[in-house]
Amino acid sequence: MTSSLRPHGDRKSPFRSDQQAPNAPNAPNAPNRQAQPGRQRDAFFDNAKYLAIVLVGVGHAWGQILDGNRTVETLYRVLYTFHMPAFIIVSGYFSRSFDLSPRRVKRLITGVAVPYLVFEVAYALHRRVSEDPANDISLLDPTYLLWFLCALFVWRLTTPIWQTVRWPLPIALGIAALASVTPTVGNDLNMQRVLQFLPCFVLGLVLRPEHFQLVRRRSVRILSVPVVAAAVAVAWWSVPRMETGWFYRNAAVQDTGAPWWSGPILTLALFGCSLVLSACFFAWVPGRRMWFTALGAGTIYGYLVHGFLVKEGSYAGWFSHPALDRPLGEIGLTVLGAAVITLLCTKPVQRVLRCVVEPRMEWAFKRDPGEAARGRERREKAEVREARAPSETGEKVSV
């Protein structure tokens, strides 16, 4: 995700779907409360979120053993072409109903802003204890994987704009292209990534259920096999010829020494590759309930917590063990990364950390008179339905 994924990288280096509108890698999409009674979760999207967050964890593990390992770096580049874009597309898709109503703004604060503040401080303190006692706490400079929460907060707030303009995706691509040639954007809130990944979020906003049905056809699933094989071949070829940092999208092209005009070209090329490989990923996501489907509701927990293990391993030198230079060690690290992030998405972890990942914070918000009135109206309608139901079956109604 950032240059900090690399060994010795510095600190600048997915979802919540309860309302069918993820917030962060749960996203990333982000926090998720229990689904409301009578509301059925879509197994396909829960499966997609879980599989995407597993790929995020595996990618972070691979990021620590890249140097001199062409095979791992090849797979790493393929993974970084689509895993966060796919996650962001799902986040955008479930943000289609976002508006600036008090209820949704409150959810944005409790599900994205508050976890960002809590975990930014936690990551900074962790680094103080484990590596750098003088490490500062900066709320404007997201540590490691927390850039996604900053981005999601900004993207969500701008959703009404994208729902209003006539050509949202071309405009978003234009903004991303301009960001790629603007070094002065700076590191505050990791705005380069916010802007360069923006088209993926906007794409999710304009997608409809039939688009996901389209890529899940058997023909697309079969076609995806040679497409991914070709992507692996291109990634293998690119390792000695192209910097891995291009895939992080966290800097302007001038910062890499490339000519300015390559920025828009690279932006469009990466977006096209991300779109194709994301479609291949969605084509292979199961649509039925699986053993891991329920874990899709806890991906924000796995996303936020696994970074501590990766960073601790980097500080303590775990990834320098000679065993990780051999194929069996690389496979073992891959399996371990997937297993750890799976465990971090489970219910026990959610119960322990819900107070900071999905705080209710009713005390912090004004009571919405409109919501209260709507609640009374819903209750009255429910009471009327309950009163009528017996009479419709021939039974007497007690008055």
Image: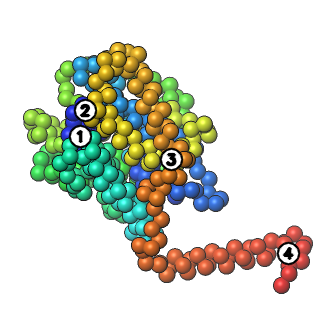
Across and down, in percent, residue 61 comes to: 35, 31
Mark 2–mark 1 contact, CB under 8 Å? no
Across and down, in percent, residue 188 comes to: 19, 54
Name the mark nearer the viewer: 2 or 4.
2
Task: Inspect the image, locate mark 3, and give the three-letter code of the amino acid beneath it.
Answer: Val
Q: CA distance from mark 2 to mark 3?
A: 27 Å
Quadrant for residue 341, please give it: top left
Label 2 packing within 10 angstroms: few (<14), some (14-19), many (20+): many
Indicate which disc residue 6 carries.
Answer: 2
Name the mark nearer the viewer: 1 or 4.
1
Q: Which residue is mark 3?
A: 349
Q: CA distance from mark 3 to mark 4?
A: 47 Å
Name the mark nearer the viewer: 2 or 3.
3
Secondary structure at badge 3 equals: helix
Q: Which residue is mark 4?
A: 391
Give whichever of 213, 157 is nearer the camera. Answer: 157
Which label's residue is closer to the chain start, 1 or 4?
1
Task: Inspect the image, locate mark 4, and give the three-letter code of the amino acid beneath it.
Answer: Ser
